[in-house]
Amino acid sequence: MSGRARLALCAAAATLMASCALLPLVAEPTWLLQLIPLVAVQTGVGAAARRVPLGRPLTVAVQALVTLVLLTLVFARQQAVVGLVPGPDAFRHIADLLRQGSDDVSVYAIPAPLTDGIRLMLIGGALVIGLLVDTLAVTFRSAAPAGLPLLALYSVAAGLSDGGADWLWFLVAAGGYLMLLLAEGRDRLAQWGRVFGGAPRSPGPSADTGAVAPVRAGRRIGAVALGVALLVPLVLPAMQGGLLAAAGTGVGAGHGNGGTISAVNPLVSLRDSLNTDNDRQVLSLRTSTSDLSDMYLRIVSLDDFDGTTWKPAQRHITGVPDTLPTPLGLSGDVKRAKVRTTVTAAQWYAQDWLPMPYPPSEVRISGRWRYEPVGMTLVGDHGQTTRGETYQVTSLDVQPTAQQLAAAPEPAATLRRQYTKVPATLPKVVAGTAREITAGARSHYEQAVKLQDWFSVSGGFQYDTQVEVGTGPQAIANFLKKKEGFCVHFSFAMAAMARTLGIPARVAVGFAPGTPQADGTVAVNQKDAHAWPELYFEGVGWTRFEPTPTRGTTPSYTLSHTPGTSLPDPALPSKNASSAPSTAPSASESCSTEARRVQGCDGPSAAAAPHSGGSGGGPWWYLLLVPAGLLVLTVPLSPLLWRARTRSVRLGGYARTEAGAVAHTLAAWQELTDSAWDHGIVPDESLTPRGAAARIVRLGRLDPEAGAAVHRVADAVEQVLYAPRPRPAAGAAADVHRVTVGLRAAVGTGARLRALFLPRSSVQVLWALSARWSALRTRLAAARPTLRRPSQQQG
C-alpha cells in the first residue's frame, strides 16, 4: 500500500473515531453504521481522483459532488431524478430535513430520538468533516491542520452532551488524530531515504537517530498535547472546567436559556392523593370565568408510551417568555375567550411543575421557572417548587364546535408518526377492541366520542381507586377485561386505543375542577388529582376528552344533542360558541420553532406531505445502491477523467535517454494536437509538424506567445524525427500547457465546457477498442483449424 493510500485510510478512520463522540447525543447508534460505508466511498473517490491524477481543486470538487449524491441517495431518493441525481425537489427536501433537524435539536433533550432531520445532521456533518480532513491531510499533504475539523466535531458533541464519559470519546478522537499524524510523518520520512530507517548506526547517545528518534518525538509531542488539552481547562477558572467538566445540577443546565428536563413519572403520587384519608387543600383559585366545568389545571403531559406505561419525554426548556405562543394547531376560526386566574399553592405542596389551565398564554410568577414549549408547561429550576407560590395565569378557553372537530383534516406526518406510535408488544386485543367500538364512525372525531362514551357510559366500567395501576404489556388488556380502575387506567387505555386508530394522543396529569367556596374562590384538594387523555385535531389542537366515569366533566363538544345517538349533532355549536371569526392570531401567524418541529403549522397534511426519503431500507440497501450511483456518476465524467489521465501520462516524467527524449517529445506533440482537436481544430495527418503548427496557430487565433510555443514543440518533433542524435527538448510540457491556455481563451464558454467534459479527442478510445476487437477476431480466425471438405472423387 502506498503512503498516500495509507494516509487516506487513516484520515477516514480519524473521522469515524471523532464521530463516535456524537453517539451519546441520540438514542440509537444505527446512524454510525450508515456513515461507515459513506465515508469509505468518499475516501475511495478521493483516492481514485488523486490516482488519475486530477488537480487538487478538481479532486475536492469530485469528492464534494459524490458526497452530495450519497446524501441524496440516503435522504432524498424519492425526490431525486432517477432516484440518484439531486434536483430542485431533492434540494428542497434536504433543506426541509435540515430545518426539521434544527428544530428537533432545540426541542429534544439528550439522548434525542433519531429523527430523519437529526440523522441528516449527524451523517451530513460527519461527511463534511471527513471531506475537510481528507482534503487537508491527503490532497494537500498537511495533516496537522486536519485536527481543527476533528476538534470542532468533538467540541460540538462535548458541548451538547451531559454524560460522564466525555473523556472516553475525547481519547478516541485524539487517538484518531495522533494516528493520522503518525501516518503522515511516516510517509514524509520514507521520502528521505534509508538514512531514517533501520537500526541506529552506533550505540550510545546517538541511538536516537533513525526511525526511533522521530517516532519518539512524535509520541512526546502527542502526550504533551493530550495532557495540555485535559489539564489546562481544569485549572483555568475562566473556562468553567473545560470540555470534560460535568454538567450542573438541577433541571436546567446552568443559568442560560437552554437546558433539558427529564420528568419523573407523576402517577404514583396521583394514586396516593386519590386514596388519602386526609383530603387537604392543594390550591386556591380566583378566576374570571363563571363556568368552572373546564377549569382543569394541567401539570404535565405524558407522551412517551412504551407499552407498559405512559411517561413524560425528555424535553428542551427555555426561559419563560412574556407571551406564550399560540397553541399548536389552533386556527383562527375557532372560538376562544381569555380567562385570568390567580393561583395560590399551599405551603406544604411542593410540586416541580406549575399547575395551570390549558392552554396558557401568559404567566406571571417569581422564582426560578423554565418553560417547556412542546407541552406548554413550566418547571422549577434548581430546586424551585410550587410551595407557597402565588401566580397569575392568562389562559384560553377554547370552544370548538363538533362540526369543526368532525371536519378536521389529517395532521402533519411528523406529528402523526410521533403521537400515534404504539409498541409491538401492545396486545392485539387493544386495537381490535378499538376497531369494534368505533365501527361505522366517519371521522376520527366520531371515533373519539365513541371511545369516550364506551368507557364512561355504555361499556360497564366501574371507578375504583384501590385497583393497582398495573405493569407489563398486559396491563391495558387486563383493564379492558376486568373493567375496573381509576382515571389512570381510563386515560391510558383510551389514549392507546386512539393511537391504534391513527389519532394522535397523549395523557395529561393535573387536577379536575375544584369546589367553589363562599368567598368566591375555588378550592382544589388532593382528591381532585386526575389524569385525562388529550387527542389532537388539526385546526383545534390538543383537545380534552373525559372517559373516566363519575370524574371531571364531559366536554360539551362531545355531548349528544340528538335522541338515540351517542354522537353530538355536528351542526350545533358547543357552549358559548359563535360563528363569528376570532381576532386571535392563527397558527401560521404565531408558529413557533417548537410548533414547526412537531406539526408544521400550516404545512400539508399527512396524505399530501412527502415522506422522508431516509426512512426506508437499511444500510445494506444503501450499500447495494452505492456502486450503481458511482456508475451513473462516472459514465458522464469518463471522457474528462480519460483526458486528464492521458494528459498527465504524456506530460509527466521520462527516462533521461535518447529513447526517453523521443517518446516524451512525441507525446507532448500528440497532447498538443489533441488539445487543439478538443477545441475544434481537427488534425490533418497530411501536414508536416511545421505545417500543422502553422495551421493550429491560424485556426486557433493564438496570441504570439502561444504561437511561439506551438512552433517550439513542432521544431522539437522534427529534431527527434530527423536528427542523427535526438536530444530532449526542454520545456515541452510547459509549452503544451501554454498552448492549451491560449486555445481556451480564444473560444466561448460553451466550447470550453465541451472541451472539458466532452473532448473530441476521446473518440480515440473507441477507435482503439475497435482496432483491438478487429485484431482479436483476426487472431481467433487464425487459430481456428481449417476444415477441408472431402473430395467428391470416388476411387
Image: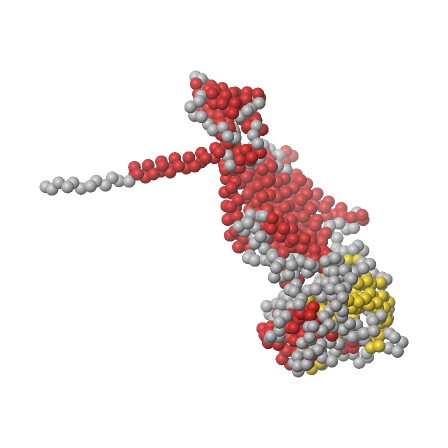
Identify the residue at the far top of this view: 724
Instruction: Indicate whether 105 appears above or below 504.
Output: above
Q: Is residue 136 left or right of residue 360?
A: left
**Which quarter of the figure has residue 135?**
top right
Q: Is residue 186 visible?
A: no
Residue at 55 percent of width and 38 percent of height: 50
Q: Nearer the viewer, residue 639 or 450?
A: 450
* Residue name at image x 47 percent, y 35 percent: 762
Q: Residue furthest right?
A: 519
In the image, 751 versus 734, the foreground residue is 751
Instruction: Please report the residue visible at 62 percent of the width from the left and 68 percent of the height from the top.
Output: 502
Left or right: 289, with 462 as reference point: right
Q: Position of residue 358 (x, y in %)?
A: 77, 67
Residue 608: percent from left, percent from top: 61, 59
Query: In the visual, does 80 lie left or right of 507?
Result: left
Q: Quadrant of residue 684?
A: top left
Res. 290 visible in picture: yes
Instruction: Return the residue nearer the eye: 564 or 107.
Output: 564
Residue beneath the point at 69% across and 75% down = 568
Q: Nearer the viewer, residue 291 or 229?
A: 291
Residue positioned most to the left: 795
297 left or right of 133 in image: right
